Image (cartoon, rainbow, N blue to C red):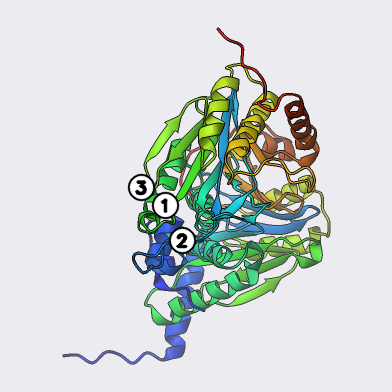
Amino acid sequence: MSMPFYVSPEQVIKDKADYARKGIARGRSVVVMQYAGGLLFVAENPSRALHKISEIYDRIAFAAVGKYNEFENLRVAGVRLADLRGYSYDRRDVTGRSLANAYAQTLGTIFTETQKPYEVEIVVAEVGDSPHEDQLYRLTFDGSVGDEHGFVAMGGQADQITTALADAWHDAMPLEEAVRLAVDQLAQTPAGNGGGEPRTLTPAQLEVAVLDRDRPRRKFRRITGGRLAELLGTEDDSDDAAGEPE
Amino acid sequence: MTLPPAFLAPGSSSFAEFLAAHDPTLLPNGRDLPAGQVLGAPHGTTIVSVTYPGGVVMAGDRRATMGNVIAQRDIEKVFPADESSCVGIAGTAGLAVEMVRLFQVELEHYEKIEGASLSLDGKANRLSTLLRGNLGLAMQGLAVVPMFAGYDAETGTGRIFSYDVTGGRYEEHRHHGVGSGSIFSRGALKKLWREDLSATEAVTVAVESLYDAADDDSATGGPDLARGILPVVAMVDADGYRRLPESELDPLVRSVVQARQQRPDGPVAPLG
């Protein structure tokens, strides 16, 4: 029987991290940002059915990039956790912070204890009564949590988008301006790792949602079809769309 | 806290099924009672539903009783189930209110996990399943009898479902009442209901029928104008669930009460 080679723990962790990073960079980006009326989520996603952006609870939403089955698993777990907490305590006791903590612990455990880490990056966002109370938590594949302010970009060419947003994003942007900024940034970066010209993204290629501060109780709302085309100043082409998320 | 495996397990989009597997003590029926005891718990009483073209109205009185005592005079027994349906409860108040809470979470949970709402019949069936789990408690005197009503977008009509303690589900047409005063309210509904009711007339019919229930059933409370306690009235139509605010309800209830001072038995239905 042959002896297995010794691999240092540092090397194991590094290999896993590289593996996860590569998986995440393959997909297309998602942008989450504050706007005047709450929080905005924009993803490049041609699928109408397989979402990258979802409602978790009254004030909390979830955005993810990476492997669909893995982040879908986390999303369902988050909905279960939030509904369980709201049911056994009160709706006001469900917070983005506790959800982000649970995800961080879970991702951390999966990263260290299993062979294959989750190839996902997620944002847990909670809209507050005022912009100061908004919370944006970014969680990476190894369970690290970052408390972000203003905007987050993840997946695909996230670094490039983050740099661009750092210049262009400002407080209290109207919804239309915020949507156009996010979509422009997503269009600047070609899909996948290859080079190429900036593209034009149509409503059918986009998944857009908001946590609208002024709505009663359930603040999450998807922006689709005609309303999205109106915000982008284009034609609504969402009827002839179908496909898989990448 | 790391999420326990149950949270990450693929499978059901039902919150009640998740609870049953993960923490059954949180279910309304998640406790065993010693046999042969009948508890004196507060009971809620009369709920009525009235359809009208394009929607449905549900109304409930405000009284909970415990034997001969009025346990609460401003209890609420009509709730939104989700954005396009409502649920009213009669029977053991504590269990019923908890069951409504579970039902509300159940519908929202499904909607969030699946990304689509259940059909109206699907919702009615889910309530039936929740109720069936309560059969053991019902046999010990803690029965819950809900009524479910909602707007069916496929047919563009309001629909009413009634239940028995075993979870049996029955679709009711035109109008229905449940609870101890329902025999009297159903009589009134039969005489007052017409096919072409407007939404406001449907509310009036519901309030009149609750008045008749309170008139003859000691466990049903009439409008308490001295305290400003009015029935809870909700309506569901294509625009969704809406609870009637006091500003709209108050004049309507007052005119019903005033008319009864002229004619205590209420409006006369024409013969023939």
Decide: is A98 above or below B18: below
Mark 1 is surrounded, within 10 Å at the Cα level, by few (under 14), some (14 to 19) or many (20 or more) other residues, namely many
Q: What residue type is labelled 1?
A: Leu
Query: Image check: B242 left or right of B160?
Result: right
Residue identifier under label 2: B28
Q: Which amino acid does label 3 sit on?
A: Thr
Tag on residue B163? none
Residue at 43% across, 32% down: B171
Sequence order check, earlier mark of 2 and 3? 2
x then y, percent, for residue A72:
47, 59
Sequence order check, earlier mark of 1 and 2? 2
Residue at 72% across, 58% down: A33
B182 and B16: which one is in front? B182
B146 and A102: which one is in front? B146
Sequence order check, earlier mark of 3 and 1? 1
x then y, percent, for residue B186:
53, 30
Mark 3 is surrounded, within 10 Å at the Cα level, by few (under 14), some (14 to 19) or many (20 or more) other residues, namely some
Q: Nearer the viewer, mark 2 or mark 3?
A: 3
Residue identifier under label 3: B166
Residue identifier under label 1: B130
B185 and B104: which one is in front? B185
